[in-house]
Amino acid sequence: MRGVRALLAAAVIAVTAVLTAAAPGPSPTPPPVDPVRNMEYWLKEYGISDAWKTTKGAGTTIAVIDTGIGKGPKELDGAVVGGADFSGVGKADGRTPVGDSDRNHGSWVASLAAGRGTAADKGMIGVAPEADLLSLSIGFGSSASVPFVDQVAEAIRWAVDHGADVINLSFTTNTLDWDRSWDDAFLYAFDHDVVVVVAAGNRESGTEEVGAPATIPGVLTVGGVDREGRASRTASTQGIVIGISAPSEELLGVSANGDLVIWDGTSGAAPIVAGVAALVRSAHPDLDAANVIKRIIATATPSERAKKVPDPLYGYGLINAAKAVSAPVAKVSANPMGDLREWIRLYRRAESTPQTSPTPTPYTVAPLPEAEPPSSAASPLLPSSDSLRYGTVPLIVVSLGTILIVLGVTAAARRIRSARTPRPPSR
């Protein structure tokens, strides 16, 4: 997801410039084509330069939640109007790149979305060159002192509160599920009419299927294609949540120090789509986020390689900026990429607040009588009043009664035997 390949483009640009200057042309000779602009094939092939006849994104704001937009590139002079750091290690304005291997990633993304060029018709230019940018720096992996999920959640809220019309997220977690704190953060963006554009991920970096935040209902997930419009084998992935496809190979980017690079990945495809979303919002300020997304997917160029629409590799097709801005599209009342609130209702039910039940009336138990005070200590060999009352006396009575009964029975038996014994005759 982060720039999977970055090569210095100076040599390529130099060769292109030589070939352009040496190429014969009609008389009078037209102004030479800037070699950098000439490398931005997506501007013409995906209808972006045609869309500029209507708008270049003026009046819109794109929030780039990434490693921070550097202050070095001339192509980004005047583009960044605000920012903040959420990594805990960057500068407060979000303009100091965070991380080691990823420190240029945010600048590459920003230059694709809204680069200004270096002069008239020169230097790298973004898809929406008149849109404003917000630089929200976060850190990937160990390059931050704040948990990643917290960084993203807080950055989304900050972006919404500071006027973002579009939020770009060029990263993946490589897991289908997401932290529950993101439920509220993404709902906050959707409830405030913000278009959230998310990269699908890259096979080359280990993402076989899309992962969060691309799996969150309501976001516009972007897959990547190569120069021939085929799903990129390295710089893209697949999943039923992919909504649109855009170029993800042989992309240009401006590093934090101003160096121009060539890189691959849906991390670059996403800001191209985010720029188109800014163009649509600029051309149709009355449209809500759901209808901006609807225009983008409804006007996509169907892929000849797609087996169905939407397709797990291409979504609804390849981005077409000119049609997205100008074509007639019927309005919708719901986000075509899904409803996060409904998903939460269905799949977070186990966390709902339990229903209250009436509290039973307590039963008062009468207090027990006080215990009798203990008797004075006595020898265990001598009888006590209790032992006499409950032991000795009853035993004597029972014993005497038993003896009397036995004696009575014995006496009676003797009388009976005496009466039956025959007496000798008397003379």
Image (cartoon, rainbow, N blue to C red):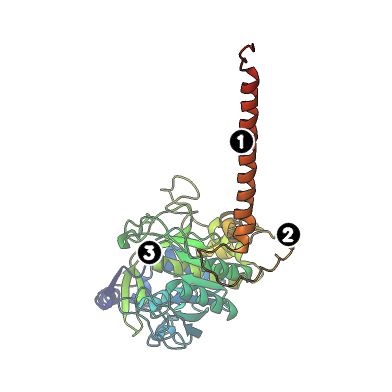
Label 2 close to label 3 by CB (< 8 Å): no
- Look at the numbered disc 2 and give the secondary structure of its residue: loop
Q: Which residue lies furthest to the front in this view?
A: 427
Residue where numbered disc 1 is placed? 406
The image shows residue 90 at horizontal and vertical percentages of: 41, 85
The image shows residue 349 at horizontal and vertical percentages of: 59, 56
Q: Residues within 10 Å of mark 2 (few under 14, many from 20)?
A: few
Which numbered disc, 2 or 3, marks the residue that appears first in the sequence? Answer: 3
Q: What residue type is labelled 2?
A: Pro
What residue is rendered at 39% in x and 55% in y?
209
The image shows residue 379 at horizontal and vertical percentages of: 51, 68
Q: Which of 417 and 336 is in front in this view?
A: 417
Residue where numbered disc 3 is placed? 248
Q: In this view, does 333 lie to the left or right of 179?
A: right
Q: What residue type is labelled 3?
A: Ser
Q: Is residue 1 left or right of residue 379?
A: left
Q: Which amino acid does label 1 sit on?
A: Val
Label 3 close to label 1 by CB (< 8 Å): no
- Look at the numbered disc 3 and give the secondary structure of its residue: loop
Residue 360: give its label.
2
The image shows residue 204 at horizontal and vertical percentages of: 30, 61
Q: Note whether residue 299 is visible.
A: no
Which of the 4 image quarters holds residue 371? Answer: bottom right
Query: In which quadrant of the rendered image does the C terminus lie?
Result: top right
Residue 282: give its label.
none
Q: Which of 218 and 389 is in front in this view?
A: 389
Q: Which of 229 and 216 is in front in this view?
A: 216
Q: In this view, does 426 lie to the left or right of 28?
A: right
- Look at the numbered disc 1 and give the secondary structure of its residue: helix
Q: Note whether residue 102 is visible.
A: yes
* Residues at marks 2 and 1, CA–CA distance in whole angstroms: 63 Å
